[in-house]
Image (spheres, rainbow, N blue to C red):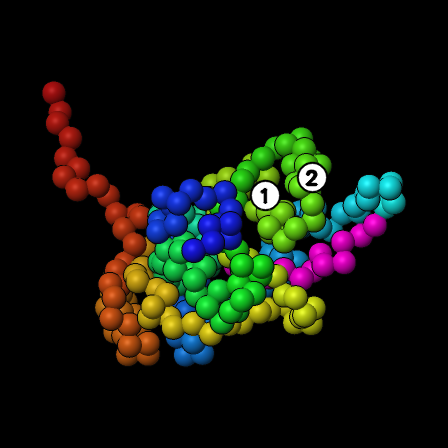
Amino acid sequence: MNTKNYINLQATEFDGYIYRVMPLGRFYELFANKQNVLVRPSKWDDPFENFILNAPARLADGTIAKFAFNNDFYGQCWTRQTSSDAIWRIYSPDKTGVRVRTTIRNLLTGLQAPLGDWAHKQAFIGKVQYMGDRKLVEFGNKVFRGGLHVRALAETLLVKRNAFIHEREVRLLYLEKNKGKQDIYAYSVDPHALIDQIMIDPRLPLSDVNKVKDEIRRRTGFKGRIMRSLLYAPPKDMIFPIG
């Protein structure tokens, strides 16, 4: 196993759980098409994404140049946060989405599998580091001190501003060596091997939960655990003494 493809992660974290909330329709597409889909960072909501590779670079001789491969990465965002009101509201706006669970190792292995000998140069996974503006500039000034190698390029997509620290992101990254013209990169996966748990939006009415569970089983054949999030459920035994 090449641990250099795991960035900002300790070996003890490789089998840790990560989560992704998505609309129910997209979830069904994952199982129907048996493909996981990554997008170019330019499609992510934060306009500050990929700021290093989109900025001018100063070469050793003082020449100012642009990165020719600033648009060659594709990525997918997951979170280590098990429960988050903000994430449900952002990624399941109609209150009918689901949260899927996998592990860091499992997600990367699925991306690497079809790449063969190129896997160690094209597929990465890493934990996002959150910084203030000054630290971000410092990071940009030193990230390529060891040379313009592919791991350093991937590292540039694993920094964000402190305003997003609540996301606790892990990102799956793919570098397209053939200058892909599409804004997405889709690769084949076995959804049943990738996903080990499904959680239903906590805002879905209780009266609809079993219907959605049955529909998921019927349309996907998923054999794992399906549950409704208890994010808004009150703690058990919430009886307080008086006097």
The three-letter code of the residue at mark 2 reads: Arg
Residue 213: percent from left, percent from top: 27, 69
Identify the image quadrant of the C terminus. top left
Residue 191: percent from left, percent from top: 37, 70
User: Mark 2 or mark 1: which comes first in sequence?
Assistant: 2
Task: Tell me the element at label 1.
Answer: strand
Q: Nearer the viewer, mark 2 or mark 1?
A: 2
The three-letter code of the residue at mark 1 reads: Val
Residue 120: percent from left, percent from top: 54, 59
Identify the image quadrant of the N terminus. bottom left
Residue 70 lies in the magenta-colored region:
yes
Report how many numbered discs are placed on residues in the image: 2
When the figure is inspected, residue 142 is found, relative to residue 121, above or below; the finding is above
- Highlighted magenta segment, given as a residue range: 65-76
Picture residue at 33% right of the left edge, 79% below the top: 219
In the image, 222: left or right of 87?
A: left
Picture residue at 33% right of the left edge, 70% below the top: 192
Q: CA distance from mark 2 to mark 1?
A: 17 Å
Specify the label residue 159 is tagged with. Answer: 1
Specify the label residue 145 is tagged with. Answer: 2
Residue 221: quarter of image: bottom left
